[in-house]
Each structure stands twice: as structure tokens, then as C-alpha cells.
Amino acid sequence: MGFMRHNGLYIACLVVFPLLVMIFFTTLMGEGQPAEMPVGVVDLDNSSMSRKVVRSLDAFQNTHVEARYADVASAREALQRGEIYAFIYFPRDCAANMLAGRQPGISFYYTMSFLSAGSLLMSDLKTIATLGYAGVAKAKLQAMGVAESQIMPLLQPIKVELHRIGNPHTDYNAYLSPMLVPGVMFLFIFIFTAYSIGTELKFQRSHQWLEKANGNILVALVGKMLPQTVLSLLMMIGYLIYIYGVMGFPHQGGWHVILLLGVLSVLAAEGFGIFMFSLLPSMRMSMSMCSLWAVLSFSMVGTAFPVMAMDSALESLAWLFPLRHYFVVYQTSVFSGYPLSFCWIHLVCLLAFVLLPLPLLGRLKKAMMQFVYMD
């Protein structure tokens, strides 16, 4: 505790930086979804129908009509320069051809270089194009004398009911922040667990450290890790209270599941850090491997790309990342409210990470007694 008090790195990386990360991510996606994303319009028809569709598109929450272009080439150049994320194209005589039943094409182009922006705008553009057609078709059928009760079954034979379970507002903040922030906290815990043990070699205190524990490496580790474990637990629990209690993120599973997952995750992260130093008893190598493993966790967790769709080798490798098991338990029991029995194997895996250093305690003790620190 005295060493932690005099070494500002511990407070900076276990308290200050996690706090900054919490504030950054939860405010970055504070609106839930990207809003007012710029789109362009190429309207060669310039009819009342096309102008109405453009006004309706601009009224959508996700889109903002940024500019109008004279032709597709200039709109495509703006898209390539990053000035807009998408544009919609109305050909000449679009409304007249639609009323005449000639099936004109309304085209929309969107960039998938930005996955979230492209997906959301594609959905809005597709919706507005469908609504534009439906409005013209409805007016035409009314002019032909078709009854109102018969028009809608013709335009929409099947009525779709969309139910977004667990996150009805498609709130990116509620879905991603509970993974991103713990992932960064895992990174700091991984690194500073290895750093904390490595300092005993670096400052030539390893013999004294073991003597204080009467040669029992397990007692020595508990004494070494307890202060920063308490600190990390306080940060993790504080974050969980902040997002679920203050910000109101969906948590169908209840507080007992949330707190159990938080405590188990911190202990699993520290267990992995101790295991990595025991396996590679060098501060530089163990911290490098911990950093690499933590960074890879963001790709292997399954939020950006589903694990079940990965190559079979990568799907198997995903089991070796504590953050993956944290996310599955969160998604299953906290976010969706299913019983812990639905994800018991992932809880067992987190517990396995806690116990992972035990087989290598003898190797760690030998390293503390015999290894000489080298810069």
C-alpha cells in the first residue's frame, strides 16, 4: 500500500484513467444512436412527389439532408470525400412514370466504410423509398375509386410487427458501453497485475517479499494483490452502479447478477495477469502479452462480429479471453434477463481464470528466488 501511494501509476491507471474512459464512452454515445448524419440528394425529377420524399427523409432522426447535387458523379465524389454518408437519386420523370405504372427506379447509395452509419442510413433510405411509392400508389388507387379498406391490403399484404427484445430503442450506448469500459478496465488490471509482481524482481525485493509470507507464495500473492483488488472492485462496482442505477441501462437480471459478474470479472482479470507473469516471469514480456491479449479481446468478444460466424479456430480461441465470458453472461443474464443456468459454462470459465495461476505457483516462487531482473 505504501508503494502504491508513492507510485502515481497505480492511482492513474487503476482509478483516473478508468474514470475518464467511463465518462468518455457513456457521453460519446449519449444519444443512443448516431443522429443527423449527412446525406445528399440528386433530384432530376424535381416533382412534388420527390420533394415530399426528401422532406420526409430530412425529418428522420438519423438523417440530415446536407446538400443537393446536379448529377450522380458529383454526389459520388462528395461521398468519397466523406462529406456525406449516402445519397438518394431520383431520375427524370420519376413521378410521371410511377403514376403511369412504368416502375421507375429510385436509387440510393451509401458507404459501408462506416458500418453503423451505412447500416442505419440504408434502413432509412429503404424505408423512405418504400413510403414514397406507397403514397403515390395510394393516390392513384383512390383516383380509380378503390375503397380505402381495400387499398392497404394491396399495398401491404403482410403487416410486419417488429419487436426489438431487450433494447427496443436500439441504444448503442446501452449495448456497447457495458462491454467497452470493462474491456479497458481489464486491460489496466492485466498490465498492473504483472507490473505489481514484476516490481519485486525489479527492485530486488523478491526474497524479502517471500520472507514476509514465511515462504508461502500463495500468502505473498494475496498480500500483494489485495489492495489493488479492492481498488479495482470499487471501480468496477461503482461503474455498474453508475450505468444501471444512474443512467438506467437495461438490466433484466437484477443486481445480484450484476454484482456477481463484476466481482468475478475483476478476479478473473487478475488471475490471468498472475498466470501470464508466472508463465513469462519477466516484467517486459508479461506486460506485453497482457496488453496484446487485452487488445485482441475487443475483436474476440463478439460485439463487432459474431463469434459463431468466425473461423472454427478463432471460435475456439475466443474461449481463452475473459472479456468474452464476461460479455456472454452480461448479454444473457443481465441484458436479456435469462437465468444464470443459461450461461453457466461461461461463469465456470471466469472462475477457471481466477484459479488459473494455481498450477504455476511453484514456477512463480522459483522465479522470485532465482531470476535476476535485466532491463
Image (cartoon, rainbow, N blue to C red):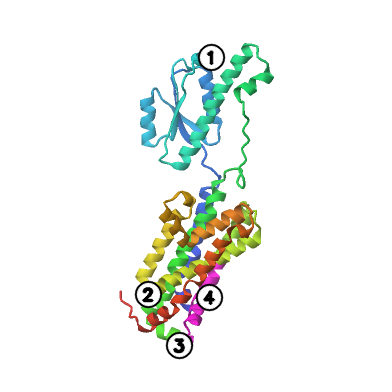
Q: Is residue 47 left or right of residue 246?
A: left
Report crowding for label 2: few under 14, some 14 to 19, many 20 or more residues within 10 A (C-alpha). many
Q: Return the residue nearer the eye: 231 or 309.
A: 309
For the residue labelled by badge 4, is the local secondary structure a helix, a strand or a loop? helix
The residue that label 4 is drawn on is: 226
Counting residues from the start of the chain, the first of labels 4 and 2 encountered is: 4
Residue 151 in the image: state x and y as whole percent.
64, 19
In the picture, the disc for residue 281 is 2
**Label of residue 211 in the image:** 3
From the image, state whether disc 4 or disc 1 is nearer to you: 1
Question: What's the magenta region?
Answer: 212-233
Residue 224 position within the rendered picture, expressed as x and y whole percent measured from the top left: 48, 78
- Contact? badges 3 and 4 (CB < 8 Å): no
Q: Position of residue 296 (x, y in %)?
A: 41, 57
Q: CA distance from mark 3 to mark 2?
A: 19 Å
Q: Earlier in the sequence, mark 4 or mark 1?
A: 1
Q: Nearer the viewer, residue 135 or 144?
A: 144
Identify the image quadrant of residue 70.
top left
> Which mark's residue is nearer the viewer, 3 or 2?
2
- Asked if disc 3 and disc 1 are in contact, CB closer than 8 Å, the reply is no
Q: Residue at x 48, y 78 (%)?
A: 221
Name the kind of residue labelled 3 in the image: Glu
Mark 3, Cα crowd under 10 Å, few <14 / some 14-19 / many 20+, is few
Left or right side of 176 for 194: left
Type of amino acid at the residue the image marks with label 1: Leu
Please report the residue visible at 66 percent of the width from the left and 58 percent of the height from the top: 254
Q: Is residue 225 left or right of residue 363?
A: right
Mark 1 sits on what residue? 99
